[in-house]
Every structure is written in structure tokens, then in C-alpha cells.
Amino acid sequence: MSDPKTLDHDENPALDAREEKSRERNTFLFLTIFLAPILAVVIVGSYGFFIWMMQIIYGPPGGH
């Protein structure tokens, strides 16, 4: 019998499941640790910049 580490993926479905689970975990960690905070900062910063530009162009909100 051959070593399970050297078998092709077709011959060892458990290896595919482990690789997929590892890939899913790495994707989840990337999304939660890096992408979500970066997107939050970009979205809030963009909205703030938009409001700032609108106030420069049209003046502050409220009665004139």
C-alpha cells in the first residue's frame, strides 16, 4: 500500500476535503482580518470626503 501523502487527489478524497477546509479557513481569515476593515475605512473615508466636497461647493447645511 502506498503512502497517503503521495497519492493523487483523485485517489485520496480526504486530502481534498482537508485542502478545501484549509482554503476556506484562509479565505475567511483574509476577509475578516484584512478585507472587511480596509473596506470599512475606505467606505467611511469616501463618504466623509464626499460630504466635505459638497460643503465646499454648496456651503454648510442649514439656513443661510
Image (spheres, rainbow, N blue to C red):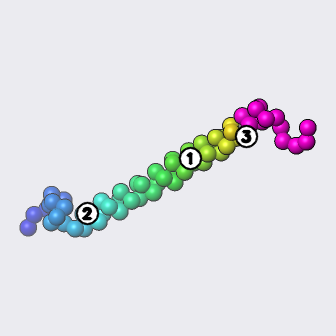
Residue 57 quadrant:
top right
* Residue 12 shown left or right of residue 23 in the figure: left
Which residue position holds label 1?
A: 39
- Amino acid type shown at disc 2: Asp
Q: Which is more toward the observer, 55 or 47?
A: 55
The span picked out in magenta is: 52-64
Residue at horizontal 82 percent and vertical 34 percent from the top: 59
Q: Position of residue 27 (x, y in %)?
A: 42, 54
Q: Earlier in the sequence, mark 1 or mark 2?
A: 2
**In this view, which residue lies farthest toward the left?**
1
Residue at horizontal 29 percent and vertical 66 percent from the top: 17
Q: Do the residues labelled 2 and 3 touch (CB within 8 Å)?
A: no
Looking at the rendered structure, which numbered label has been put on residue 16? 2
Q: Please name which of the two marks, 1 or 3, marks the residue nearer to the observer.
A: 3
* Residue 32 shown left or right of residue 44 in the figure: left
Q: Where is residue 43 in the image (x, y as percent from the top left)?
A: 61, 45
